[in-house]
Amino acid sequence: MRDAALLDNYLELRLEPRWPYIACVRKFIAGFFLIGLSDKERAEQISMAASELLENAIKYASEDDTRLRLEIKRRGNEIIMKVENPADPPQINILRREFALINAGDPEEIYLRRMEEAAKIGGQSRLGLIRIRFEAGARLELITREREVEISAIFAIEEAP
């Protein structure tokens, strides 16, 4: 049961909202989960989700406070990845609307529609959260407070035989 013991570890990172950190964190998380999971594809999906959540946090972060928090833990047969960041109320409202849209239907349909929209208009693709739902098959949860956002991606995992 070595794999299960590794997955029971708790991981927390606190960092400034800087774009160059994302690739480093993604590589670290991929390596961390390659050790703990026998499924390389699942490890890659989890690390992709981490980078998408961090990108989202940087995009919506308040400029008043310069901290992001990434937490990863296991609960039963799930891995819960949570990113918290400060945000201003107008940004929180935008994120709430975005969250409602990406959770309003079939992940594949929404993802394909968003890809078409991004190709037509250019600029911000708004693919990150729906990519986590579609490509990684994760459930997403959003909690907002007065000036803080918390997004969780929940991944089902299978035990190695």
Image (cartoon, rainbow, N blue to C red):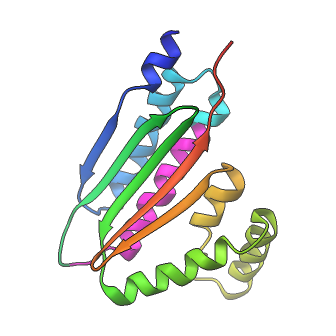
Front residue of 37 and 96: 96
Q: Nearer the viewer, residue 7 or 56?
A: 7
x and y, in percent, of residue 65 in the image: 18, 71
Q: What residue lies at 18% left-to-right and 78% top-to-bottom? A: 64
Asked whether residue 144 appears in the rendered view, the answer is: yes
Kindly identify the residue that appears in the image at 66 percent across and 70 percent down. Answer: 103
- Asked if residue 58 is among those painted magenta in the image, a careful observer would answer yes
What percent of the width, then of the height, locates residue 126? Answer: 59, 75
> Residue 57, relative to residue 50: is it above or below?
below
Quadrant location of residue 107?
bottom right
Is 124 on the left or on the right of 24, as rendered? right
Residue 124 appears in view: no
> How far across and down, in percent of the image, does residue 57 sit?
39, 66
Q: Is residue 140 above or below residue 89?
A: above
Which sits in the foreground, 151 or 116?
A: 151
Q: Residue at x 73, y 73 (%)?
A: 115
Q: Residue furthest front?
A: 76
Q: Quadrant of the C terminus?
A: top right
Query: Is residue 144 a member of the stretch shown in magenta?
Result: no
Relative to 156, is 111 on the left or the right?
right
Q: Residue at x 50, y 18 (%)?
A: 4
- The answer to whether 136 is drawn above or below residue 143 in the figure is above
Q: Quadrant of residue 84?
A: bottom left
Magenta span dominant secondary structure: helix
Could you say where residue 46 lies in the image, as x and y percent from the top left? 55, 43
In the rendered view, does 127 fall on the left or right side of 79?
right
Give the total of numbered labels. 0
Relative height, residue 10 to residue 149 (above, below): above
Q: In front here: 42 or 22?
A: 42
Q: Which residues are magenta?
A: 44-63
